[in-house]
Structures are given as structure tokens and as C-alpha cells.
Amino acid sequence: MSDRGADAPLRLITIPWSHFCEKARWALDRAGAAYREDAYLPLAHALPALRAGGRRSVPVLVSPAGVLRDSTDILRYADTLVPPERALFFQGSREPDAGRAEVEALEERFDADLGPATRRVAYFHLLPDAEGAFAFMGGSFRSLEGAGAAPPWWFGRGTFRAYYPVARAVMKRVMRIDVASAERSRSKLRAVFDAVNERLRDGRPFLVGDRFSAADLTFSALAAPLLAPEHHPSPLPPSSELPSELRALAEGLRGEPAGAFALRMYREHRRARPARSAVG
């Protein structure tokens, strides 16, 4: 999807609207890395990821340092491309060790709790509506057309209609999406937002220390599917286009200190992306 040259040394395999993929993409963009992004629909991503040396999940980054199969590993790789004072994990910088440990702990919690919870809650409401899902997924690929790149041939409306029932069934099974699991995930989502709201009560500009870190990036990226930040590189539907229950949740979260914080992180720290030109 993103390409700073056909010979870019890095290749990032993604589902374009995936929040874990956005986490990795944001770190690479922030580091100014030259990379090619190959974007796929859910299920279609698995074979390219495996062929690249990853697992069946994305993001996968093919780099001179090897194949990185986890978004946190990609953030740490991005830290090798920036000066120590800009490292997301504060490595080699002047921040105290306690600050680095705090960043790591928050990033790990957001990965374990917020990421899966956001995904399950969003898909629980979106998957039953094929037209809504097409609008959600199609926005990412329409953004490629706007940059002069055509979506893949198999993303036509007819192909999607044939593909979608199978994709929906597999996604629900693999991600264990049902009423009970969605409610548990909603509780986890609530707990994370409550914790971030509490952390922000003292007016701090960032979650840890006095500069942007992996904690800020991870929280903002993993909450993004519900918050729909204006500066997200893969267009997400505004809350007005979401199913009513999901819309109410999204609008409520956007109005909380944690939601406003994530939107500010996108507005102030999400580096603009180069023109996009490659799609899987």
C-alpha cells in the first residue's frame, strides 16, 4: 500500500485497517523508514504472511534484521532507526529506568487487553451487516485509488459479496466472537479507558514522562477503530455510519479524557504518510 520506491528495503504485510498493523505502520512512519506495504483483506492475508516467514497473523515486517512477526518487535526495530532521544521505549535516553519500565508495562497491557477487546467489540457489531462491513473495509482501499493506486482485482463488490459469508464465519470462529465474549471484551475496554482516564487526571501531556512513547502510540493506535481519528492513514467510518450500539460506545469514548488524548496524539504526532502505490 505505501511505497517509497520499488526497492524499499522493508516490506510490511498488513490488513490496512487493523489496529495492530497501524501500530507498526505508525512507528515506521515516525522513524522515516522506507517501506512497501502490501495490504490484504482478512483471510487473504494469511498465505502472504506465511510465505514471508511470518505466522498467519499480521503485521509482518520483512527487514534486513530478519522477519519480525509482532507489532512490539516492529516498534523496537523502529527505535534502531531514530536517535536515542526519540526512541519509543526510551532506550539509551536520559529517562530513568523506572520510566522505561512503565512504558513497557503499559504497552504490554494495551496489547493484551485493549487490542483484542477493541477488535472483538468492533467486529461483533460490524460483521452481521455486510454492507456496513464493505463500507468499513472499502474505505481503506478507496484511499489507495485516491493516491493513484487501484485496489486488487478481487476487491470488486461482486467478489466481496461472494467472499464475505465465508470470511465472516471464519473470523467469528477464529476470534471467538459471540455475545458473551463481546461483553467480556467491552468490560476490558472499559477498564483500560478508566485506567488511562485516571492517569490523565493530573494534566500530564503524555502517559509516561514528558515526551511521546510506545505507550502513547500503542494506546492511540489500538483504540483508533472506535475513535476514528481524522489523521488515521486508512480511513475509518465516522461514528454516524456505525451500528447504533457501536456508535453510542464510540461517541462516548471520544468524549472521555482518554479518547480525547488519543485523538490529540493522532493530530500532533501521526506523521503524514507518503503516496501509496502497492497493494496485495
Image (cartoon, rainbow, N blue to C red):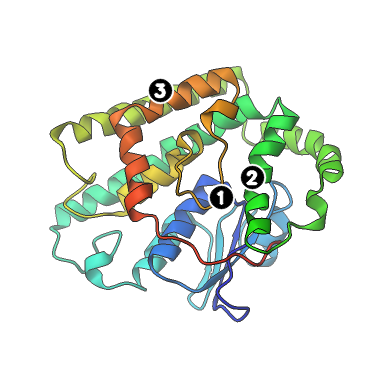
Mark sitting earlier along the chain (1/3): 1
> Marks 1 and 3, Cα distance to the nearest angstrom?
22 Å
**Looking at the image, which residue is at 56% across and 50% down?**
234
In the image, 83: left or right of 13? Answer: left
In the image, 184: left or right of 12? Answer: left
> Marks 2 and 1, Cα distance to the nearest angstrom?
7 Å
**Looking at the image, which residue is at 70% across and 49% down?**
41
Q: Position of residue 220 (x, y in %)?
A: 38, 44
Q: Amino acid at mark 2?
A: Gly
Q: Nearer the viewer, residue 60 or 276?
A: 276
Q: Position of residue 239 (x, y in %)?
A: 52, 29
Which quarter of the rendered picture does the C terminus lie within?
A: bottom right
CB under 8 Å between discs 2 and 1: yes
Q: Nearer the viewer, residue 147 or 2?
A: 147
Which residue carries the number 3 mark? 252
Q: Amino acid at mark 3?
A: Gly
Q: Amino acid at mark 1?
A: Ser
User: Do we see residue 177 in this rendering?
Assistant: no
Q: For label 2, count other residues whose C-alpha is less than 10 Å away and answer few (under 14), some (14-19) or many (20+).
A: some
Which residue carries the number 1 mark? 234
Which residue carries the number 2 mark? 139
Q: Position of residue 208 (x, y in %)?
A: 21, 47
Where residue 246 is drawn, which disc sits there?
A: none
**Looking at the image, which residue is at 18% across and 52% down?**
99
Q: Position of residue 42 (x, y in %)?
A: 69, 46
Which element is circle 2 on?
helix
